[in-house]
Image: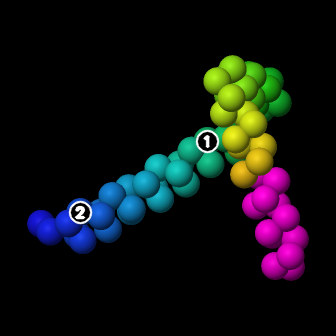
């Protein structure tokens, strides 16, 4: 297997993983979501996600 094939295979796994994570988050109830947010903010990931989500939402609005 060459590097190109390995890279493609890893991209597919990453997409499947991120889709699974996104769906898992969608299924959280309010208290579970609050707990997740608290835990993510403990290591500054909350700020990173806030920035990324803000830009993604802006981009989505411009595309509409």
* Image quadrant containing the C terminus: bottom right
Q: Which numbered dot is residue 15?
A: none
Q: Which numbered dot is residue 6?
A: 2
The answer to whether any part of residue 32 appears in the image is no
- Residue at point 72%, 26% (across, down): 41
The answer to whether any part of residue 17 appears in the image is yes
Residue 32 in picture, x, y percent from top left? 73, 26
Between 59 and 35, the one nearer to me in the picture: 59
Mark 1 and mark 2 lie on one chain; the one further toward the N terminus is: 2
- Is 54 magenta? The answer is yes
Q: Residues within 10 Å of mark 1 (few under 14, many from 20)?
A: few
- Residue at point 80%, 69% (across, down): 59
For the image, the number of numbered tags is 2
- Residue at point 78%, 43% (across, down): 50
* Image quadrant containing the N terminus: bottom left
Number of the front mark, 1 or 2: 2
Image quarter of residue 56: bottom right
> 51 left or right of 39?
right
Name of the residue lying farthest toward the left = 1
- Is 59 magenta? The answer is yes
Q: According to the image, label 1 marks what residue?
A: 24
Image quarter of residue 57: bottom right
> 27 left or right of 12?
right
Q: Is residue 64 above or below residue 27?
A: below
Which portion, as a residue range, is magenta? 53-64
Provide the secondary structure element on which disc 2 rests.
Answer: helix
- Residue at point 55%, 54% (across, down): 19
Residue 53 in picture, x, y percent from top left? 76, 52
């Amino acid at each position: 297997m060459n590097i190109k094939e390995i890279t493609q295979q890893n991209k597919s796994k990453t997409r499947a993983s991120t889709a699974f994570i996104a769906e898992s988050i969608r299924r959280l109830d309010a208290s579970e979501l609050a707990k997740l947010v608290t835990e993510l903010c403990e290591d500054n990931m909350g700020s990173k996600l806030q920035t990324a989500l803000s830009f993604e939402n802006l981009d989505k609005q411009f595309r509409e």
